[in-house]
Amino acid sequence: MNKVSFVQLSPSDNVVVAISELAPGHILEVGGESVATVNRIPAGHKVAVRAIKQGEAVYKFGSQIGSATADIAAGEHVHSHNLQHKHDVITDVPSTDPPAAPAKLERTFEGYVRPSGRVGTRNYIAVISTVNCSASVSQFVARRFEGDALDEYPNVDGVFAVTHETGCGMGYATLRHEMLSRVLVGAARHPNVAACVLIGLGCEQGSMGYLFEKHGIVPLHAPDGEKLTRDKGDAIPVLTMQDEGGTRKTIERAVQIVKDLLPVVNANRRETVSASELSVGLECGGSDGYSGITANPAVGCAADRIVASGGTAMLAETSEIYGAEHLLVQRSRSPEVALALIERIEWWKEYVGMFGLELDNNPSVGNKAGGLTTIAEKSLGAVAKAGSTALEAVYQYAEQVHQKGLVVMDTPGFDPASVTGMVAGGANMILFTTGRGSCFGCKPTPSIKIATNTAMYDRMIEDMDLNAGTVVEGSTVDQVGEEIYNKILAVASGEKTKSELAGIGDYEFIPWTVGPTL
């Protein structure tokens, strides 16, 4: 194993990142110069390799991540006590320079081809609450199919409940209403969901009627005892507790509907399809100083392969693109795409300002403990997940994503809410990098968790699917990217992720909505 103690990400950087904890007096050989550490440098943290004067720019990844708030000596720890950042967003985009398309990559996986033509990587039945008032009922229905209840249906991945905290107490047809509706419709029509049941209370503001009229959901009011088959087309069984006669009757009716659906869903079979049917959401959570060095660039290599295969790679977390948006602006397909991204970032600045916050203060307590200091530093590492291809489109939260190639979806940085938006948009796979150790999973979309460092991977191996920490131990970023891409194809074909094996994913469905609760 390579015992390197630090990494310099660009020759122009005036800081390096400690790969392991460095004691005071540790000698770093950088660019032909010897630098002795002044103080203890935790693993993943930055150390200056030359003197930096107060007000001078600090560089990492070859880009400015902030300015020194005090004189920093060569060998000194660089972090929140002597580094800060204030970012100005680009507003003028006269032209862009999108890179050439990558060489075509022909790969396949075994997926479920739906009547709509979309392809799923899993075969679930969803019980979807349109309002929080029906959440317990949906959970009770799903629980009836736990344990050995599905033993006769080996091709069914499970029955799960889609519940949330809202659905009423909001203005009709407002932004909040529309955002929630996009999420619910996205769950109902998701390629990993072979069938679903919608359950509401009956008097909620987020009414079934809005889903029917605005989003084209077709209700199927099956008489008691009628078998539900594929010849019903896109129609969805819809129940309201008030019409059914209360909690118990709604549960029993929904359970019977699911029982009738099981043979239909179980009849689905995987078949060989092009990797162009992949729509992969890119997420990072619990990031640390290794994230932008190991896992995120490796995911970027995998994202390039997804695009080369004709698929979609979906970057999210707009609040963590802020500070590195110039990298995506430069490679946007057109100025219009670039301006759409900038508009979303400007919206976020205004939005958080309403609550007395700033995007510049985004790094969390865990991020800072892991070595990340400023939003620019965090975002430069996060955007590495996007690889190197052209940015083709920018989508609003939970919009249906139809564009192939690299796209951005506007989501918050909170992992469950971000992934919920991408899943609602059609992501049939999730890549999730983590340095501190996130145990995230979600249904109905498999989440491949990628550790940024070997120490955490070994400690949390029951939750981690891949270890990108090998990048600082001798493997190349591209080699790990190839490993990730092959893992995507395997999981898309049915291999279970660690979170799936642990049964995680029933409570991570968190729609993001903007607006007051009335």
Image: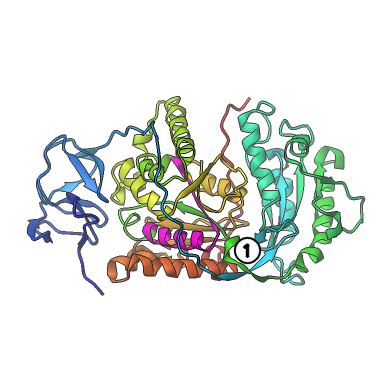
Vertically, is 178 above or below 301? above
> Which residue sits at x=40%, y=26%?
356
The answer to which of 348 and 41 lies nearer the viewer is: 348
The answer to which of 344 and 363 lies nearer the viewer is: 344
State the extent of the magenta-drawn residues as a range: 296-318
Q: Is residue 130 magenta?
A: no
Rendered location of residue 5, percent (x, y)? 20, 64
Tally of numbered discs: 1
**Residue 132: which quarter of the image?**
top right
34 sits to left or right of 412: left
The answer to which of 223 and 389 lies nearer the viewer is: 389
Q: Is residue 310 magenta?
A: yes
> Which residue sits at x=59%, y=70%?
109
226 sits to left or right of 363: right
Q: Quadrant of the N terminus?
A: bottom left
Residue 53 seen from this side:
yes
Q: SS for tag 1?
A: loop
Q: Which residue is mark 1?
A: 121
Q: Amino acid at mark 1?
A: Thr
The answer to which of 91 and 252 lies nearer the viewer is: 91
Badge 1: residue crowd in 10 Å (few <14, some 14–19, many ≥20) = many
Vertically, is 192 above or below 338? below
**Residue 195: which quarter of the image?**
bottom right
Predominant SS along the magenta part: helix
Rendered location of residue 421, percent (x, y)? 57, 45
268 sits to left or right of 338: right
**Residue 464: which quarter of the image?**
bottom left
> Which residue sits at x=79%, y=57%?
258
